Image (tube, rainbow, N blue to C red):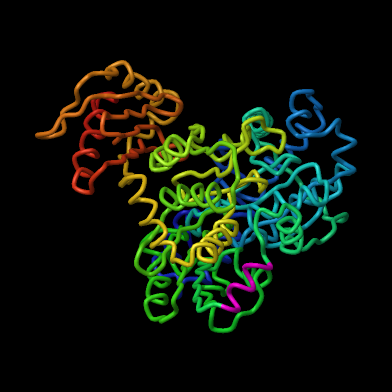
Amino acid sequence: MALFKNASECWKEILSNPKENVGLLSEIERFAKENTDTTNVVFGTSGWRGEIGMDYTFNNMKIVTEAIIAMFKEEDPAVMEALGVKDFKEIQKRGVIVGHDNRFLGPDFAMAAIGLLNREGIAAYYSGETTTPEFSTALEDLGAAASINLTPSHNPARWAGYKFNPSDGGPAGPEITKVIEKFAAQLMSGKAIIPASPAVNYKTIDPVALYEKYINRRKTINLDAIKKFIADKDVFICIDHVHGATRGRPQRLLGEHGSKIKYLRTDNDYLFGGIAPEPSSKNMLMVTNALRASNAALKLGVIMDPDGDRIRFTDGTTELPMNGFGALAFHFFHKYKKLSGVVAKSVATSNFVNAIAEKLGVTLKETMVGFKNFRPYMLPTAKERAIITFEESDGISGYNHTLEKDAMFGLLIAIEMMMSTGKTIGAYFKDVQDEFGYFYPDRSGVEVDRALVGKPLIEKLSKIKNTLKVGATVTFGSKSKSIKDIITVDGTKVIFDDDSWLLIRPSGTEPKVRFYIETRSEDEKDIMFKKAEEITKAAIGA
């Protein structure tokens, strides 16, 4: 008799006491192999994600892989152009890189995908445990046609995911993902059962070695100078890997520096100690405590997510999420590295960088949420090439670097900041704030009925822009502000005359409406959130 009705019940039991119930993962494996229920495959802002054993099963993962193969074989000219290949024969020859983060069943899912590729005569590279930016660098070095990255990024332990990158290494755009979704939906509607195929033609690669070659070739970051700085100066660095795929990377890139670098949570733990493995303030506590126990003159702490594309920073006193660090990185690249170009950020990201860019005379580009929207400014051929690209959800990349966000890149920049300024990142940040102004960003949101998710919610929220006009006055308790600008590139962003703002947009992955705000003083946050909720409820009729 089965212990649980479905995988969700089993996951609930496992996560109620991860240490005691880790043995129940064998039940999750059984569900993942035996469950043939179909699901709706949607590639959101960063790939398709699902609960292992429920919607993310071996059969559904193989259906997505079959959909990709069908896309390859269809040879639609627009898709081939987006992939950066001529035809299916070129894909067969150049091959596809397949890897995973540290999630449960990652290697098994990877081999199942490789088997299907091999069945169609497509060569494959197996990269093992790999960070998201390492797929980008490996694609360039190997000249592969595409990559399959089995990760749900920072989602909790019960989740798995599927990212697809074309040959340029960037996240797949809608011209690719919509086609994958179309073929997946056809297979799902027919309740297709995909038989396993043996993985017989693949080459195992070292993604870290390829990443290091890429860094040294691109020369945006000087690894030798960083290693010398750590060795020579009174430095202490603490890195929390939260059991993710970034583990082992800093040692190989920076070398061993004894007690000068401390590594946290590097052991194998599919359940992440029972926490959501995201770079949050709560999860940063271990890093902060380690820094405060050190007497080093220059201290730096970071926490990275499991697939190495998100990072948060602290010096033990000042914590910097990407809203602040991205703006600081732009200032650093412009002033110290003497790079010119534009700066790009998502619409939900702090306007601190706007203030810096305006004063420095640098053009700013504001995009929809999702790192894939930075591609036009990151390509080497771009007419308006970005110095730095970043988004509020802790992702960053920069000049001559990958089209994917990269936590390791963020770490290396932070060390270079200390090396060039002789200051902690907190002291450097304070200097920049004193010169360009103080901004206080935050985010929240409300859940909505699942029946609203998708087009109905988008349509209801789109009406907000019709109720607010530039020049109109908005009341916040006893205060009032006039609307300076309204941006509708992704949701509705209302900018006020003091450069504070609020953004209301539907979540791309959950039944939620997300609020992003930025005030010019800490004590205005609550009233700004209340106003965002008031506007939202009026729009959706709640």
Q: Is residue 288 left or right of residue 72?
A: left
Q: Is residue 69 left or right of residue 384?
A: right
Residue 446 x/y as whole percent: 30, 39
Residue 261 higher or lower than 492, as above or below = below
Residue 103 x/y as whole percent: 59, 61
Q: Is residue 391 left or right of residue 170?
A: left
Queried whether the magenta region covers residue 27, the answer comes back as no
| Number of marks in picture | 0
Residue 130 higher or lower than 40, as above or below = below
Q: Residue at x 81, y 27 (%)?
A: 75
Q: State the extent of the magenta-drawn residues as a range.
A: 224-232
Residue 404 higher or lower than 342, as above or below = below
Residue 11 x/y as whole percent: 47, 59
**Residue 3 shows in the view:** yes
Q: Residue at x 20, y 28 (%)?
A: 481
Question: Foreground: 339 or 156?
Answer: 339
| Quadrant holding the C terminus | top left
Is most of the magenta stretch helix, strand or loop? helix
**Residue 60 shows in the view:** no
Q: Residue at x 37, y 21 (%)?
A: 462
Queried whether the magenta region covers residue 230, the answer comes back as yes
Question: Foreground: 201 or 17?
Answer: 201
Location of residue 25 (image quadrant): bottom right
Pick out the residue farthest to the bottom.
258
Q: Residue at x 59, y 79 (%)?
A: 232
Location of residue 207 (image quadrant): bottom right
Residue 152 x/y as whole percent: 56, 51
